[in-house]
Image (spheres, rainbow, N blue to C red):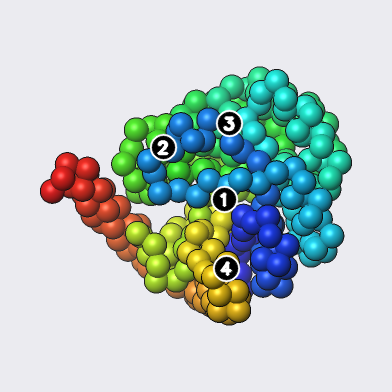
Amino acid sequence: MSFLDFMFITNDPKVASVAQENGVRRVWVDLETLGKEERQKGMNTVKSKHALTDISVLRPVLDKSELLVRVNPINPKSETEINEAIDRGADMLMLPMFKTIDEVKVFLGIINGRVKTTLLFETKEAGTIADEILSMGGFDEAHIGLNDMHLSYGLTFMFELLSNGFVESLCNKFKAHSIPYGFGGIAKIGEGLLPAERIIAEHYRLGSTRAILSRSFCDNQYVDYDKWKYEFQLGVNQIRLYESLLPLLPKSYFDENIVEVKKGVDKVVSIIKAKRNGN
């Protein structure tokens, strides 16, 4: 039994087809560029260079998976960008980096119910106004972006938001308003600075039903396509197997897991800080 809908970022139709074949719910075209380079300068993060034309390239390929498009934060060109994304065949649009209720209203107003919508909570301000946004409603889903959110709070490691209770608090708000939600991304089983198993168990405990397949699923796709395709399928299947075990486990397992998450986060934070200090 699986509970997570996977999302995968790509503008390559061959890669998108493999994702779809392996049950990825949403293939994600990422148009967001405004402000990202400055926010994540010097960080080892993936910065997509997708274009509106990529939507048209992927649209004929996807007949099972949905086509999700992350647009830029609200700006003078938002209406043009959003309308073109819809015209080219997006099934759902995502708004990143919003800080005010007015930005959300502009986003939803331009779309006007033409496609599904999801809000990416990834700024300190978005977390502060979450209750107001949820009370307003008018959108379909929510996702917590751990990378930019942890930068917004001045934290060292993105999963500190999981260990300090922030993610749980925001998930509880979404749940109270019956908004489907997810957070962050997950690596392959056995990989990641914090083991993927720990993160997946937290998704289950917190009622999250969406996650991005992280960069570990992107490795070698342009170097050895056949090897990558096999490893992608294997990675998804391993997660699905682990997911199927979670409903069978006692509450004590999840209680212990969050303790281990906190220990793991503390260890990673210590290592990162030591490296920054040249130790």
Q: Residue furthest left?
A: 279
Q: Secondary structure at mark 1?
A: strand
Structural distance between the alpha carbons of marks 2 and 4: 25 Å
Tell me which amino acid carries mark 2: Lys
Q: Secondary structure at mark 3?
A: loop
Q: Which mark is residue 207?
A: none
| Image position, residue 217 (x, y; %) | 53, 66
| Image position, residue 118 (x, y; %) | 67, 41
Q: Residue at 51% of width from left, 58% of height from top?
A: 214
- In-image side of 262 versus 162 (left or right): left
Structural distance between the alpha carbons of marks 1 and 4: 26 Å
Q: Which mark is residue 34?
A: 3
User: Up-down: is 105 above or below 232?
Assistant: above
Is label 1 or label 2 in front? 2
Q: Secondary structure at mark 2?
A: loop
Structural distance between the alpha carbons of marks 1 and 2: 26 Å
Q: Which residue is mark 1?
A: 182
Any part of residue 64 in sight: yes
- In-image side of 152 versus 270 (left or right): right
Q: Earlier in the sequence, mark 1 or mark 4?
A: 1
